[in-house]
Image: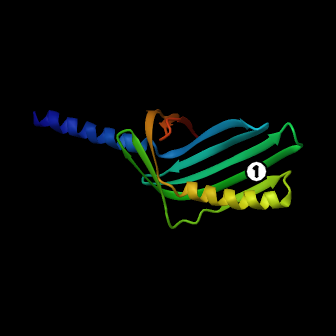
Amino acid sequence: MKRILLIGSLLLAAAIGASAQSLIGTWTTRFSETEQQDGAVTTMEGTDLLVFTESTFTRTASFTVTISSGTEPVNIKITASGTVPGTWTRKGDQLTLTPDKKAKPQIDVTTENAPEFISTIFSEQLRKEVKSALKESETGTIVSLTDKEMSIKDDEGEILVYTRK
C-alpha cells in the first residue's frame, strides 16, 4: 500500500512539474481587427510575443493601426511596440501575468502620412496607452495547451491562440 501511495505521489508531483514547465518557452500570436465609423476604416494588426522562464516572463507587443477614409484622402499608419518583464503564476487553468511595476518599458511609435500635429498627438497618446496596457496584470483561462499551441480566453471572452516558436 505504501508503495502505491509513493508511486502515486511521484506521478502527481511529476504531473504538476510538467504542467508548469509546459509553459516555459517562447509563444507568439497575431491579431487583426477592423472597425468602420463615419466613412473611416480603422484596421489594427499586431503580434504578442511571450517568453516564459520558470517564474518570469517578458512580453513584447507590437501593432500597426491604419486609418483611411473614402471621403478624404487620408491614410495614416501608426506603428507601436513595447517590451515589459514580469512574473507569472498558474493555478489550474488560470494564468496570471504580473508585469514588473518598476519597469520602464521603452515604447516606440512611428507615424506615416500624417500631418506633424496629428503625429505628435497620436504618438504621445499612444505611447501612454501602450505603456499603461503593458503594466496591467492580466488573468486568462487556458482553454487548451499542447507542446505547440496554447489557447487563452481573456477577460472579454476572446480566445487568443499562441504558437510555440
**Which of 27 and 6 lies nearest the eye of the viewer?**
27
Residue drawn at the location 63% of the way across and 60% of the way down: 128
The residue under label 1 is 78
For the C terminus, give its image quadrant.
Answer: top right
Q: Position of residue 25 (x, y in %)?
A: 51, 46
Q: Residue furthest left?
A: 1
Residue at the front extreme?
38
- Pinpoint residue 95: horizontal percent, then vertical percent: 42, 44
Q: Is the image coloured rainbow, by chain, by secondary structure, or in one colour?
A: rainbow
On the image, which quarter does residue 14 sit in? top left
Comparing 77 with 149, the one in front is 77
On screen, residue 154 versus residue 2, left or right, reads: right
Residue neighbourhood size for the residue with mark 1, other residues' Cα within 10 Å, grouped as few (<14), some (14–19), many (≥20): many
Q: Residue at x 47, y 53 (%)?
A: 137
The reply, left or right, for residue 133 in relation to residue 1 is: right
- Position of residue 83 measured from the top left corner of the image (x, y, whole percent): 60, 57
| Quarter of the rendering containing residue 40 | top right
**What secondary structure is found at the residue carrying circle 1?**
strand
Which quadrant of the rendered structure holds the N terminus? top left
Which residue is located at x 56 percent, y 52 percent?
59
Seen from this angle, which residue lies furthest right?
A: 73
Please report the residue visible at 73 percent of the width from the left and 39 percent of the height from the top. 43
Determine the image quadrant of residue 15. top left
How many numbered callouts? 1
134 relative to 164, above or below: below
Image position, residue 163 (x, y; %)? 56, 37
* Amino acid of disc 1: Ile
